[in-house]
Amino acid sequence: MSLETSSPLIELRDLSFRWRPAGPEILALDELLIRPGERIFIEGPSGSGKSTLLSLLAGMTLPQRGMVRILGEDLCRLGGAGRDHFRAHHIGYIFQMFNLIPYLSIRENVILPCHFSALRRERALQRSASLSAEAERLLADLDLSEPALLHSPVTELSVGQQQRVAAARALMGSPELLIADEPTSALDTDRRAAFLQLLFNECQAMGVTLVFVSHDAALEPLFDRTLRLHELNCAGRNPVAH
């Protein structure tokens, strides 16, 4: 099924979000549609609502008005536990600061999503004979194939290596949606380009939809489509937006 004819993987309509009920409107979107398999670059300066949008897409916060539909599921109709389960099953997240667990090895960090989602565990085991083998495959595909690294604590890694471990963890178990929040901000130009190519290859192989947020407009040509949030967000000029 082509991107043009498939149902949206992400569908936001008539959305309004405020951090406080009586506070200023932080994010206001009439419509936002993202198709399965797209690589989307969301660009915008600080204060344009990027982090708020990611929080809504991941079901960590809810809008005061409107619809946030992911994979056909309206997250606004789910309770907190339901959104947690949905996120664990279907969404991988690369945080800006990576959020790796310091007392776990590299391989244990990558396997972690499968402890919270039977669905991602099942998908991982469809690709490899064991969770460890799938973790090692992902790490190798992301250019972390040194056997000595697998049992090392993540605290011994460089920033670039931590970044790739975070990406492998987010991709473990083939989530339908991968959200990346400024994951390349600490890398130089050459390392950034290499990481993005590895990430794109893995997303394409797994059929993962990528939503990548950055303030670095130089990355824009590498993606299928760019969404300029400061233009889409009707409340985007509010100086207190996150």
Image (cartoon, rainbow, N blue to C red):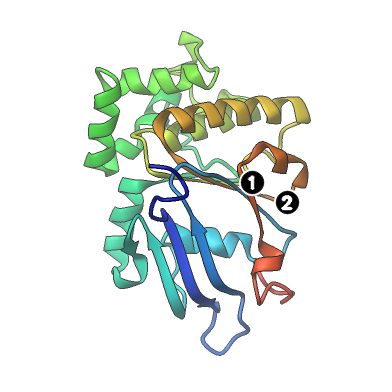
The residue to which callout 1 is attached is 182
Q: Position of residue 117 (x, y in %)?
A: 26, 43
Query: Tag 1: residue type?
Result: Glu
At x 53% / y 69%, what residue is drawn? 31
The answer to whether residue 94 is seen in the rendering is no
Query: Tag 2: residue type?
Result: His
Element under label 2? loop
211 relative to 107 in the view: left or right: right
* Contact between labelled residues 2 and 1, with CB atoms less than 8 Å apart: yes
176 relative to 196 in the view: left or right: left
Q: Residues within 10 Å of mark 2 (few under 14, many from 20)?
A: some
Residue at the far bottom: name it.
22
10 relative to 192 in the view: left or right: left
143 relative to 48 in the view: left or right: left
At x 42% / y 35%, what residue is drawn? 171
Q: Position of residue 18 (x, y in %)?
A: 55, 79
The residue to which callout 2 is attached is 215
